[in-house]
Amino acid sequence: MFPIPPFCRPVLLLQLALALLPGLAGARALSAPAAHVDADGPYVFRTATGLQAQWVCGDHVIRRDLPAGNDGLVLAPECGYPHPLMIVPPGPAAVAQVPATPRIVALSDIHGQYALLVKLLRAHHVIDAENRWSLGDATLVVAGDVFDRGPQVTETFWLLYSLQQQAADAGGAVHFVLGNHETMVLYNDLRYVNPKYLQSAQLLGRSYPALYGPDSTIGQWLRTRPTLLRIGDTLFLHGGIAPENLDLVREMDRTNAGYRAALGAPREQVKAAPDSARLFDGKTSPIWYRGYFDGRMDTAQVQALLKQLGLQRIVVGHTSMPHISSFHGERIIAIDSSIKNGENGELLFIDNGTLSRGLLDGSRVPLAEGTMDEDD
């Protein structure tokens, strides 16, 4: 194993201690750090004089100081994400309710499978051969869970960050909605983190959550993302809305602000505090709910819920399916197509209200009625 610098040893000791604490990490133990990191980065942090970009390339840390710029600056790659990046100042909190748009493409639960994501987006001309936006004025929605499991989390975040800029320039939009794994990593639940990133954190001298702290570019970006997103008459979120939580949709701006304020706060705090406990409940919260699929709600109850909220449909990730699936008469669309396994994945298309799914070979087929396959 690559020698651990003295200043990184406290990080390792903390991670090992967390893995041993009963009740904190549940049944799944924290993985040991990888022996080697071939390529990871960049991680971009705000400093007193500007910005600093950091990479891990062949177990070697590269740091590059950058001047502060009000209009953004271009960062050339070293390793990891292979394309130049336009680093822009942090923007305001994302708008959570936008008008209907003729074409929406959606997916979720990428879980670090960047190569598969790129293949899928290229197959449907969402991006071109250089991974640049090519869908014009259409909208892309990613319903959470970029973190954990797979080996290219960093690359995935930078791709979405870049596509959001490029889509806006073309009159389109890219929306990233927070999932439960975003909240888990930021409150230091590292059970599902790929061992590569535990080693990167050691080499960079930070805990893994601190690589996405409020002083980092992607950390700042995550802290502006919504958890609930309404486009026209369609609600996008990671888990789902339980019947007892209708007010969280009716007061969507307040709900999203609550999640943003809690990102990075200790797990025990957000699960116990009166103003955030409901947002992080592991059974009923918007980032965890599975009631559309596990028998807690039947079709009549789903129909009543949508009517009360003035919605045509709810689109969710989180509950893994073999393909994008329709439930309860196309009122619930499950878009976690098991990309996390690194073998296959699909896109949901909503074209002027007509739903279809895009396959990995670039073809489009009708939406299929869903059956339960596996859980996250």
Image: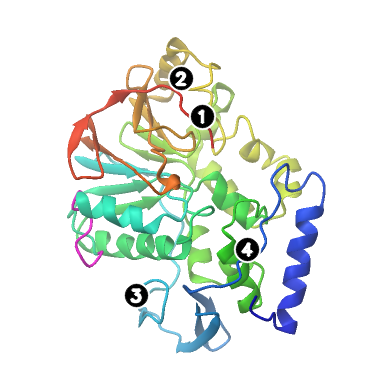
Which residue position holds label 3? Answer: 86
Q: Nearer the viewer, residue 298 or 130?
A: 130
User: Magenta region: which residues?
Assistant: 124-131
- Residue 333's place in the image compared with 211, above or below, is above
Q: Could you say which disc has been placed on residue 32 in the image?
A: none
Mark 3 or 4, closer to the camera: 4
- In primary-sequence order, the first of circles 1 and 3 is 3
- In primary-sequence order, the first of circles 3 and 4 is 3
User: Pointer 2 and pointer 1: residues touching (CB < 8 Å)?
Assistant: yes
Mark 4 Cα shell of 10 Å, populated few (<14), some (14-19), many (≥20)? some
Query: In the rendering, at what x and y percent does residue 61 appear?
Result: 55, 83
Identify the amino acid type marked 3.
Met
At mark 4, the secondary structure is: helix
Which residue position holds label 4? Answer: 209
Q: CA distance from mark 2 to mark 1?
A: 9 Å
Q: Could you say which disc has been placed on residue 305 in the image?
A: 2
Q: Residue at x 34, y 33 (%)?
A: 324
The quadrant the C terminus occupies is top right
- In primary-sequence order, the first of circles 2 and 4 is 4
Q: CA distance from mark 2 to mark 4?
A: 36 Å
